[in-house]
Image (cartoon, rainbow, N blue to C red):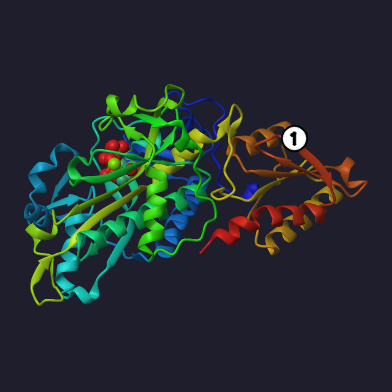
Amino acid sequence: MRLTRYFLPVLKEDPKEAQIVSHRLMLRAGMIKQQAAGIYSWLPLGYKVLRQVEQIVHEEQQRAGHIPLLMPTLQSADLWRESGRYDDYGEEMLRVTDRHKRDLLYGPTNEEMITDIFRSHINSYKDLPLTLYHIQWKFRDEIRPRFGVMRGREFLMKDGYNFDLTKEAALHAYNRHLVSYLRTYERMGLQAIPMRADSGPIGGDDTHEFLVLAETGESEVFYDSQIADLRFGDRQIDYDSVEECQAVLDEFTSRYARTDETHDESVFNQIPEERRRSARGIEVGQIFYFGTKYSEPMGATVVGPDGARVPVHMGSHGIGVSRLLGAIIEASHDERGIIWPEGVTPFHAGIVNLKQGDPSVDSACEALYRDLTANGLDVLYDDRDERAGAKFATMDLIGLPWRITVGPRGLKTNTVELTCRRTGESQEMSPSEAVARLQAIYQPVFDAAF
Ligand SMILES: Nc1ncnc2c1ncn2[C@@H]1O[C@H](COP(=O)(O)OP(=O)(O)OP(=O)(O)O)[C@@H](O)[C@H]1O
Ligand SMILES: [Mg+2]
């Protein structure tokens, strides 16, 4: 993409309405525009990152054997009356009446609808286990939408639902989700710690939230510092293996890590004092096992091996796809702007032309742009007729992890400069070496894709 042809409405001034850094930077980098309280348009740069995050979620869900589908945003109130949640959900639910005076709602989550799909088509235990998921917009009429996309009213969520014959099988599905979530967040350059949590209106006993530690997080958390040293890394897990998934769950949940709702001082105080941490965190996902809470009232049953009909055991599992953009920025920025992790960056690299209009510099930039693109790299070429300082400031603000700077002086010795956004370190090298370096840098990112 050439910047002169792109739509990147960066702001020079700090927007007054933004209280936290991720919101400020998303506005300044021209990623989003607020349309109403808690409702945003995703401008091209923001949309590109949103799609990257979504793509990683899709890949990791499917790696774990989960099946994508797409349910609508609007739902019939009748389904929610069956589960009893139409009245329980309260003012967070946006209720709509159509021209025939039928009650609809903009889905805040999809347990009822997926249970309805299941009961319409599945009859036998032989069709289990089954996990279906979608990535769809949700609406929750939050009292205080704030912090940009972190607490929106309309927001994008991945929600998945498992259907199993027994509690044991459903707990395996729970564990499988925990493993796949660890992988998902790490691919986005994030550390998200699973913590024992409270189930809220979804219901059920077993639940973990995934939290990214950040001062601006809305959740208060308590944990054993040893948990922060754990990394999932690139281990290969057989998602069908009960033992392997259980072992990962045990490893990642055996140390104390809880949100304030489940925090227990007496248990916490058994940890050596120097390892006790209290901090704030951003909830980027949550997994639940809730047994037959929906299947029983809604009649989602299967015929078991003995011929008797039983309600299926279920769980639901959510990832805050749009909130993740805010969380990633909170975890990765500096005073000059965003620093995208390689796994989610909107462009792999930027090219800065220091002397636009100089034939040799222009043609060197064009050649680089062609070579990088031909090698599968997505590049933003700043071909504006602007001062170098302004070009650097834009690149730093929008946070591309790598920048290639091309100027007349370097070209005399066939060199360009490759700069790392995170460390600020620059190295001179030939254009072809810069291409090779970037290819090598991104190879692990490409390899991680499904
Ligand atoms: N208003 C929101 N804006 C953006 N993302 C959200 C919002 N509410 C929930 N999410 C994301 O969707 C995920 C799954 O939804 P879940 O039902 O667990 O939310 P929740 O526990 O009600 O969230 P919170 O406690 O932050 O209100 C959450 O972990 C979070 O990342
Ligand atoms: Mg939650």
Whether residue 310 is visible to the viewer of this picture, yes or no, is: yes
Q: Nearer the viewer, residue 358 or 340?
A: 340
Q: Is residue 293 above or below residue 285?
A: below
Q: Ligand 2: which quarter? A: top left
Q: Residue at x 68, y 52 (%)?
A: 441
Where is residue 280? Give x, y as percent.
39, 28
The total of numbered circles placed on residues is 1
Q: Which residue is mark 1?
A: 388
Q: Is residue 303 above or below residue 448?
A: below
73 to the left or right of 8: left
Q: Is residue 423 above or below residue 183?
A: above
144 to the left or right of 372: left
Where is residue 128? Give x, y as percent.
24, 71
**Residue lying furthest right:** 413
Q: Residue at x 59, y 38 (%)?
A: 339
What amino acid type is highlighted by mark number 1? Answer: Ala
Where is residue 394? Give x, y as percent.
63, 36
Whether residue 154 is visible to the viewer of this picture, yes or no, is: no
Q: Quadrant of residue 114?
A: bottom left
Q: Nearer the viewer, residue 102 or 73?
A: 73
Q: Nearer the viewer, residue 144 or 420?
A: 420
120 to the left or right of 446: left
- Around disc 1, counting alpha carbons within 10 Å, would you say few (fewer than 14), some (14 to 19), or many (20 or more)? some
Query: Dot 1 lies on which element?
Result: helix
Where is residue 328? Give x, y as percent.
49, 40
Q: Nearer the viewer, residue 423 or 9?
A: 423
Q: Quadrant of residue 73?
A: bottom left
